Each structure stands twice: as structure tokens, then as C-alpha cells.
Amino acid sequence: MNDKVRVSIIGTGRMGAALAAAILRAGYPLHAWNRSAAKLAPLVAKGARPATSPLEAVQGSQVVILNVRDYAASDALLRTPELQNALRGKTIVQLCSGSPAQAREAAAWAQAHGIDYLDGAIMATPDFIGEPGGTVLYSGPRAVFERLRPLLLTLGGNTQHVGEDPGHACALDAALLFQMWGALFGALQGFAICRAEGVAVADYAMQLRAIGPMVEGALGDVMDRVVQGRLAADDATLATLETHYGAFRHLLALHEERGLHDDLPRAMERVFRPAMDAGHGQDDFAVLSRFLA
Ligand code: NAP
């Protein structure tokens, strides 16, 4: 007899299927529902029980994992009198991407209906789910997180409770994704520059990889400085704000000369300029953190 908690998953798209497979690998009994039933077949082959409705999935479990497209889709599925009744006394783990405000609203709804609620943010692609390097962050009642820890650990080695406030996992999700998109958009802007200047894009990609450790170091340095409040230049400063800005202005000029799409560099200019005008040229680059608050 399996003494593990009975789990259901609602939503088995790309991410939901990876979550379900990891839970099955760990030996949990799993009930799965998906709007398009055909996506359940590979999971049934791995041992999942297919549910014909969200209600059936909820009735067969103690913990309900949600991974449909967004909160609006999961609200539409769960916020019916029938489902709310079936969920009373159970636990929802909401893993759809959303905003901190949506997470707080969902947690309040759950509390009002006698449902335990954890909000999770998946900081991983499906291939990282169930792997030691997979990160999933949770916020909400710590006691609920601790109760589910063995189950949640099956989804990724870096499983962390990041606060009682149910919005904090989504807030960290937004902050981490912004950094990722900053890097990805930066790379794409670099390709545009290379095309305009006749530089082979493969050469750019090769040099981008080569400077990776330097960029990683600069990122680590700015993180440490912001956390420690060391915004003024000191002996360890790698380059002052004025030095950064001097080089950045060449980049702006290049965009103008070549008529390149310049919304991204112009947005950066709108952060650099006020800091320079306020006399921070001799401070560390980290001082810009004050101009983004
Ligand atoms: P996906 O492959 O497009 O799957 C979307 C899932 O949502 C499918 O199960 C789909 O059902 C279901 N769905 C969409 N609208 C629905 C509705 N109105 N009612 C019921 N079910 C609905 O997307 P995904 O990559 O699995 O992403 C799922 C969630 O995980 C999203 O919130 C996403 O932001 C988050 N996430 C994904 C990744 C990733 O790398 N993929 C990483 C982090 C977080 P059907 O199969 O019937 O269409």
C-alpha cells in the first residue's frame, strides 16, 4: 500500500507533463486532468490515472497541483461551488505564472474556502524539472510548505520557501525573469549591431561566449554592492559610472548612424543620464540602482 500523499495535477502541457512525470518517478499516486485529453496518454503509460474532469481529479487527491496557462484559466476551472466544496480541507499548489497580486488574491480566495494554499514560481524549463539544478520557489504558509516538502523536492533540487507572503514567489519570478530577458534582449541587440556593421554573427556569438566569465563577474559584483549598499566607487570598483557612460555614448551614436532600432539603448540612457546629471560620475555602476527604484 502506497503511504505517499495522493496528488492530482490539472494541466499537462509542456511544463505540467514534466511535473507529472517527476511526481510519478518518485512513486506518488497521481491523478491527471488536461483540457485536451490526448495529452494524458504518455502520462497514463507512466502510471498516472486519467481524470475525466477537474472535479474527478480533485476528489481523488489530497494535494492539487495547478499548471494551466495562467491564473484566469485555473480560476475558471476551480471557482465553481462544486469544486470549492471538493477542495475544502485539501491543499492547492498553484504553479501557473502570474503576478504577486494574482497570487495574493488566489491565496485569499483559498483561505475563504478552507483550502490550504501555496503559490509557486517555476524558475526552470521542463528539462530541468526533477533535476538537482531545477529551481521552484514557493510562498505562503511555511507549515504547509514543510508538510509537502518531500513531494515538492521531487520537482527540483533547489526547492525553497521564500516567504509567508503568498506574492513573494511571483515577485522573485518577475525579478529573475527580468534579468534573464535583459541578457537575452541585449544579445539580440548585439546581433543587430553586427548585421548593420557587416560583422559575422557567428563571430559575435563566439566572442559573446568568450566574455561570459567577465560578464558573470560584473553581475556578481553589482549584486554584492547593491546588497551591501556599497554604491560609491572604492578600490575594488571595476569602472566608474562615467567610464561606463562614456563607452555607452559610442553605442548610442552607432545606433543613430546606422538608423538601428534604439528603444532599448534609449531606455538605458534614461537611467544613465539623470545619474550623471546628479553628479554620480565617480560612483560605482551600482549607484544606478537608486535611479530605478
Ligand atoms: P503549454 O505547453 O502551452 O500548456 C498550457 C497548458 O494550459 C495546457 O495543459 C493547456 O491545455 C492548458 N490550458 C490553457 N488554457 C486553458 C484553459 N482555458 N482551460 C484549461 N486548460 C487550459 O504551456 P506550458 O509551458 O506547459 O506552461 C504552463 C504554465 O507553466 C504557464 O503558466 C507557464 O508560464 C508556466 N511555466 C512554463 C515554463 C516552460 O519553460 N514551459 C517555465 C516556467 C513556468 P490544452 O493542452 O488543452 O491546450
Image (spheres, rainbow, N blue to C red):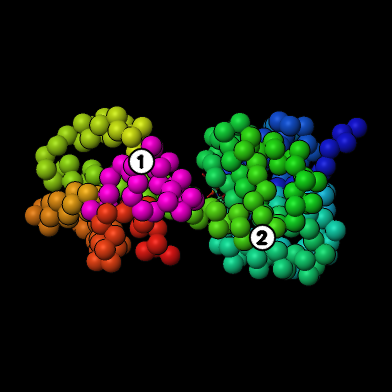
Amino acid carrying label 2: it is Pro
Q: Nearer the viewer, residue 203 or 80?
A: 203
Q: Residue at x 59, y 50 (%)?
A: 121
Q: Quadrant of residue 116?
A: bottom right
Q: Residue at x 13, y 46 (%)?
A: 196
Amino acid carrying label 1: it is Ala
Check disc 1 and report the residue beneath it: 236
Which residue appears farthest toward the front when viewing the image? Answer: 235
Residue extent of the magenta highlight: 216-242
Q: Quadrant of residue 38?
A: top right
Q: Is residue 94 magenta?
A: no
71 on left or right of 91: left
**Of label 1 and label 2, which has the lower sequence position?**
2
Check disc 2 and report the residue beneath it: 166
Image quadrant where one finds the C terminus: bottom left
**Any part of residue 272 in sight:** no
**Any part of residue 291 in sight:** yes
